[in-house]
Amino acid sequence: MKATFFHLALTVKNLEKFESFYAKYFGFRRARVIDLGDDAKLVFLKNDDNFYFEVFPVEEERPYPMAEADGPHYAGLRHMAFSVDDVDAKVQEMGEDAVITLGPLHFDEVIEGWKTVWLKDPEGNIIEITQGYKDQEGLG
């Protein structure tokens, strides 16, 4: 049976800032809100590519600091990535909201025109913004 990727679940301190950031720069909008009681809610955000964030409220404090650069290098989620036509134009559009943690870096030695920058979202999650990636031919 076929399985389709559905969502990435995140826990956030400030839903309004998180939602505003992803709506403004990546086209996300509310798809569903579920009341969890005690003024807490679970929110599904969706973009035009049918990619979802499942956004939970914080229930406990983070036990360690957020990662920098391109994300943590231990086992687990390193970063999430968005493909754009022009990395520099996207960073310029984002202005002060583009808190760069690494780059921009060019990977022309691997793929001509591949360029990437990493930045933080309002919650400190690392996001990669990339242009020019192409799959390797002949792999399936």
Image (spheres, rainbow, N blue to C red):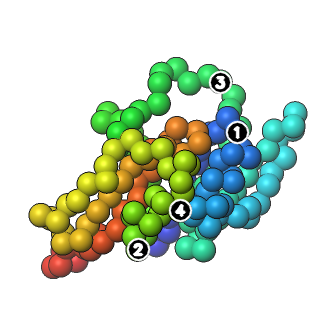
- Cα–Cα span, label 1 and label 2: 29 Å
- Cα–Cα span, label 1 and label 4: 22 Å
State which mark lies toward you, 2 or 4.
Answer: 4
Tags 1 and 2 in contact by the CB under 8 Å rule?
no
Element type where label 3 sits in the image: loop
Q: Earlier in the sequence, mark 1 or mark 4?
A: 1
Q: Which mark is residue 85?
A: 2
Q: Is residue 59 left or right of residue 126?
A: right
Q: Earlier in the sequence, mark 1 or mark 2?
A: 1
Q: Residue at x 47, y 24 (%)?
A: 65
Viewer-side residue, 113 vs 51: 113
Tags 2 and 4 in contact by the CB under 8 Å rule?
no
Report the residue marked by disc 1: 14
**Image location (x, y in percent) of residue 73:** 30, 36
- Cα–Cα span, label 4 and label 3: 34 Å
Q: In the picture, which quadrant includes the C terminus?
A: bottom left
Element type where label 1 sits in the image: loop
Is 61 rendered above or below residue 37? above
**Image location (x, y in percent) of residue 78:** 38, 43
Q: Amino acid at mark 2?
A: Asp
**Residue 138 in view here:** yes
- Cα–Cα span, label 2 and label 4: 13 Å
**Image location (x, y in percent) of residue 77:** 41, 43
Element type where label 4 sits in the image: helix
